[in-house]
Image (tube, rainbow, N blue to C red):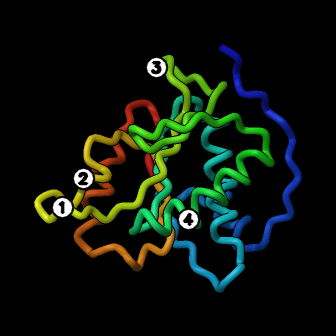
Amino acid sequence: MATAKRTDIRIRLTPIQARVLRASAPFVDLEGGIRSGKSTAANIKKHQLVVEHPGIHLLHARWTDEDTHGEMLPKWREFAQSVGLDLRWHPDEQYDEVLGTTGPSGHNSRVYVRGLRSGESASPYKAIRGLDLAWFHIEQAEELPAGYWGELLGRLSQISYLHG
């Protein structure tokens, strides 16, 4: 299988985006006004992680499927195409496999793209149960119920990768 080719990509970063990419803290609260580049910063970070840490599992989510697939997913896909990532969508598990990023486990990197709200009151965490992640980004995080954060943090369990 081909490996991801590392290419130099020139992107003019805002000060907020540059700070996100340099951040070494395990958790970063990225806030800003409309069109300040928050989503772009997250997409740049995802690109950086899948190239530098082949086989990594990431989650990119919003509270509802509607917002996730209507707003977030198209931006992610457009960005991925612009930087030369080759993606294969797996609808059964709702993730983009990043082809050519085979890691130590023999699997390519994954970017799970999911709405987090479950319609089933008996299983409110259904969208993230069973995931082993190394990193997640939640857009419009204020939409999530407070109890959801502990469950998300518990998903940061992918072996051999830094978590944050």
Amino acid at circle 1: Glu
Earlier in the chain: of badge 2 and badge 3, it is 3
Earlier in the chain: of badge 3 and badge 4, it is 4
Which residue position is annotated with label 2?
126
Looking at this rendering, what residue extends furthest in the left direction? 122
Number of the label disc, if any, that sits on residue 105: 3
Q: Which label lies toward us, 1 or 2? A: 1
Badge 4 density bin: few <14, some 14–19, many ≥20, Cα 10 Å: few
Residue 98 location (% of width, % of height) = 61, 34
Amino acid at circle 3: Ser
Which residue position is annotated with label 4?
70
In three-dimensional space, the C-alpha distance between marks 3 and 4, rounded to whole angstroms, equals: 32 Å
Amino acid at circle 2: Lys
Number of the label disc, if any, that sits on residue 120: 1
Earlier in the chain: of badge 1 and badge 3, it is 3
Residue 145 location (% of width, % of height) = 28, 75
